Image (cartoon, grey):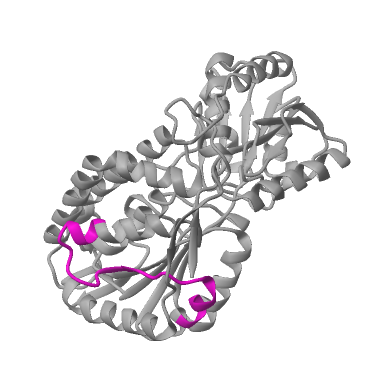
């Protein structure tokens, strides 16, 4: 059985029967059978389904938000924003998929030559709990709208969200088995990827999970896309608007109770403004309202599971042992971890190199832009970086020096349906969202007519 447990109360919300290996095999077969029909449907017709999903999400926003709050502790207002973003994603692809998937004509010595974009088949999504709707929709919408069918292995602690998402597709009239969620644990992922009908996998999760899935996909010669962890730097130069930088930093680190791959994990401050920034930052962190995630006023809820909060506590203890200084916070009670700010100048400190997945941030200083670039790159991750300055042209010469999937100037790193999203190094490979996202699981077929 798979249990869904409210991390705020510790009570079991629901239990779900695990699907057997035979049940998984049957689901794969159904998905492949439906693929042969779904892929032939005109793109414009597939798009109409997603406009319906967008409307449905908006109509039931509160219901889905409360479900997220109960299952993984997301503050309800932030959960509502997540549902709204999923609706935006649906509308974006429904409006632009036809153009994204249009044949690309290339002039050659042929009478006609072009590239066509054709779906691969059944695609598996292995998705995490931290954005239990958004991560799934980010995978599903471009994958399905390009003509594939999809299977979902969601995180076990958000099985209620997985079930709700599957019901949304039923309620919006999708043909049977275009999308199926599989109530399974990770031990069946290898079996799924070994099946001939399954032609690719998208995983969002930890480095360990990504490495394991990539190994299987490589052995099976299946297309894979990995969106893994991050240790994003948030860089504030000496000429930055500190009011904007401080306010943005609080949101960039503490939204979703800090449980985000693209959150600002390391705040790097120019030494001239460091003291002023830290004073203002601590004041704003002190004002964050913690409490029941179902409460409208709560900005900080609880972490998704108590063991995750304990892991963060262990990271903090190691960091303190290596010389880091706690400026505020640092206490844990069950799954609740209070907003914490730590200071260190040691680039080898665990908090400067590892991913911290919770409401904990480290601050340190630099004396030049070149030093800031070096510190930013001083991790195994490469998802994104934020820089704040009054003169963005200062950043232009060093944009290409950042070993990241994205550079955001005077804004926090965030995902946008219009822009490709993904990282390099240990943050993974491939891109979701934008045109690149809809082409992640297609055959880019060259056609040459003499």
Residue 372 higher or lower than 132, as above or below: above
- Viewer-closest of 389 and 81: 81
Report the residue that reaches farthest toward the front. 11
Residue 150 in sight here: yes
- Viewer-closest of 338 and 269: 338
Residue 261 higher or lower than 4, as above or below: above
Q: Residue at x 16, y 76 (%)?
A: 37
- Answer with left or right where residue 122 lies relative to residue 176: right
Q: Position of residue 71 (x, y in %)?
A: 46, 50
Provide the residue span drawn in magenta: 168-191
Instruction: Residue 375: say if magenta.
Output: no
- Answer with left or right where residue 146 lies relative to residue 127: left
Q: Residue at x 38, y 54 (%)?
A: 161
- Viewer-closest of 202 and 218: 202
Q: Position of residue 173 (x, y in %)?
A: 15, 61
- Answer with left or right where residue 346 lies relative to residue 37: right
The quadrant of the picture occupied by the C terminus is bottom left
- Viewer-closest of 363 and 331: 331
Q: Position of residue 191 (x, y in %)?
A: 48, 82
Q: Position of residue 331 (x, y in %)?
A: 73, 34
Among the 4 quarters of the image, the one containing residue 419: top left
Residue 261 in sight here: no
Q: Residue at x 23, y 81 (%)?
A: 33
């Amino acid at each position: 059985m798979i249990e869904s447990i409210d991390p705020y109360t510790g009570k079991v919300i629901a239990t779900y029967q695990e699907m057997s290996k035979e049940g998984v095999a049957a689901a794969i077969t159904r998905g492949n059978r439906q693929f042969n029909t779904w892929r032939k449907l005109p793109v414009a017709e597939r798009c109409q389904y997603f406009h319906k999903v967008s409307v449905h999400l908006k109509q039931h926003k509160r219901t889905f938000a409360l479900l997220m709050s109960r299952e993984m502790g997301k503050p309800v207002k932030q959960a509502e924003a997540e549902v709204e973003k999923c609706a935006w994603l649906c509308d974006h692809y429904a409006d632009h998929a036809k153009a994204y998937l249009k044949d690309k004509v290339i002039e050659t010595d042929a009478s006609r030559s072009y590239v066509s974009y054709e779906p691969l088949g059944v695609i598996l999504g292995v998705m995490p709990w931290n954005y239990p709707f958004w991560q799934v929709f980010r995978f599903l919408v471009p994958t399905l709208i390009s003509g594939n069918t999809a299977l979902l292995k969601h995180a076990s602690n958000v099985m209620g969200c997985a079930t709700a998402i599957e019901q949304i597709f039923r309620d919006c009239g999708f043909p049977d088995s275009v999308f199926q969620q599989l109530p399974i644990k990770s031990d069946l992922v290898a079996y799924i990827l070994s099946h001939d009908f399954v032609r690719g996998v998208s995983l969002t999760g930890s480095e360990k999970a990504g490495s394991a899935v990539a190994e299987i996909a490589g052995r099976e010669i299946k297309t894979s896309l990995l969106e893994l962890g991050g240790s994003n730097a948030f860089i504030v130069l000496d000429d930055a608007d500190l009011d904007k930088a401080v306010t943005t930093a609080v949101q960039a680190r503490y939204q979703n109770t800090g449980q985000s791959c693209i959150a600002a994990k390391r705040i790097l401050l120019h030494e001239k403004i460091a003291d002023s920034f830290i004073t203002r930052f601590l004041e704003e962190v002190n004002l964050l309202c913690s409490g029941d995630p179902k409460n409208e006023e709560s900005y900080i809820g609880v972490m998704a599971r108590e063991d995750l909060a304990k892991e963060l506590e262990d990271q903090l203890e190691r960091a303190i042992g290596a010389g880091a200084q706690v400026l505020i916070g640092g206490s844990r009670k069950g799954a609740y971890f209070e907003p914490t700010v730590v200071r260190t100048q040691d680039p080898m400190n665990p908090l400067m190199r590892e991913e911290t997945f919770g409401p904990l941030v480290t601050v340190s200083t630099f004396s030049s832009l070149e030093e800031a670039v070096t510190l930013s790159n001083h991790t195994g991750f490469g998802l994104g970086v934020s820089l704040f300055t009054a003169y963005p042209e200062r950043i232009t010469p060093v944009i290409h020096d950042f070993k990241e999937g994205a550079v955001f100037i005077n804004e926090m790193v965030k995902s946008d349906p219009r822009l490709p999203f993904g990282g390099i190094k240990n943050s993974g490979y491939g891109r979701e969202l934008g045109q690149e996202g809809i082409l992640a699981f297609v055959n880019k077929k060259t056609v040459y007519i003499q």
